[in-house]
């Protein structure tokens, strides 16, 4: 006999599970306010370009890197939001959007909210390793890729 979940418990449990995944991902970012870790090479270059643009420097003229302008503009927007916590806010918004899109994709395939949320929670540690502290092109691309699916 198939046992159904208790509706009262599982009705909002998936929201709690997704929130836990988001908190874990945000805590793994080097830009979070609680972190003392230094940004890695690519991330620090993006931050430098964002700060440079906000200080009036022109990309590819006053400063050069072979990466695309969109990554620099994302970090520029983060500098506009807040010079200290702006990058963390922007990254958290991109990660939240990615998790929502991935959850919706799993829910379309599995048709069970709780199992879909648990699938996101189980894959969170892998995503934390792949993000390598955050502020990489893959983090921002994940939002658009998962939205397209």
Image (cartoon, grey):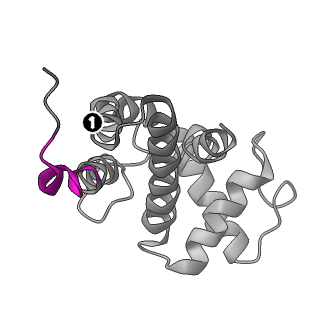
Observer-nearest of 45 and 4: 4
Q: Is residue 30 left or right of residue 52?
A: left
Observer-nearest of 14 and 18: 14
Residue at 23%, 51% in the rendered image? 20
Q: Is residue 50 left or right of residue 84?
A: right
Asked if residue 59 lies in the magenta stretch, the reply is no
Task: Report the residue marked by disc 1.
Answer: 118
Magenta span: chief secondary structure:
helix
Observer-nearest of 102 and 13: 13
Q: Residue furthest right?
A: 61
**46 is higher (above) or lower (below) than 114:** below
Work out which quarter of the rendered image holds the C terminus and state it: top right
Q: Position of residue 148 (x, y in %)?
A: 69, 41
Q: Position of residue 27 (x, y in %)?
A: 27, 52
* Span of residues in magenta: 5-14
Residue at 33%, 31% in the rendered image? 119
Callout 1 environment at 10 Å: few (<14), some (14 to 19), or many (20+)? some
Work out which quarter of the rendered image holds the N terminus and state it: top left
Observer-nearest of 94 and 105: 105
**127 is higher (above) or lower (below) than 80:** above
Q: Position of residue 140 (x, y in %)?
A: 60, 48
Element type at mark 1? helix
């Amino acid at each position: 006999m198939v046992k159904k979940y208790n509706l009262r418990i599982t009705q909002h449990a998936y929201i709690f599970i997704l929130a836990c995944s988001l908190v874990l991902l945000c805590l793994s970012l080097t830009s979070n306010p609680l972190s003392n870790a230094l940004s890695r090479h690519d991330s620090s270059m993006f931050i430098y370009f964002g700060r440079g643009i906000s200080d009036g420097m022109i990309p590819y003229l006053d400063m050069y890197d072979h990466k695309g302008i969109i990554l620099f503009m994302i970090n520029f927007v983060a500098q506009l939001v807040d010079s200290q916590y702006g990058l963390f806010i922007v990254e958290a918004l991109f990660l939240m959007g990615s998790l929502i899109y991935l959850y919706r994709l799993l829910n379309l395939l599995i048709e069970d909210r709780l199992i879909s949320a648990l699938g996101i929670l189980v894959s969170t540690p892998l995503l934390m390793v792949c993000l390598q502290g955050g502020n990489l092109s893959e983090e921002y691309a994940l939002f658009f890729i998962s939205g397209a699916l």
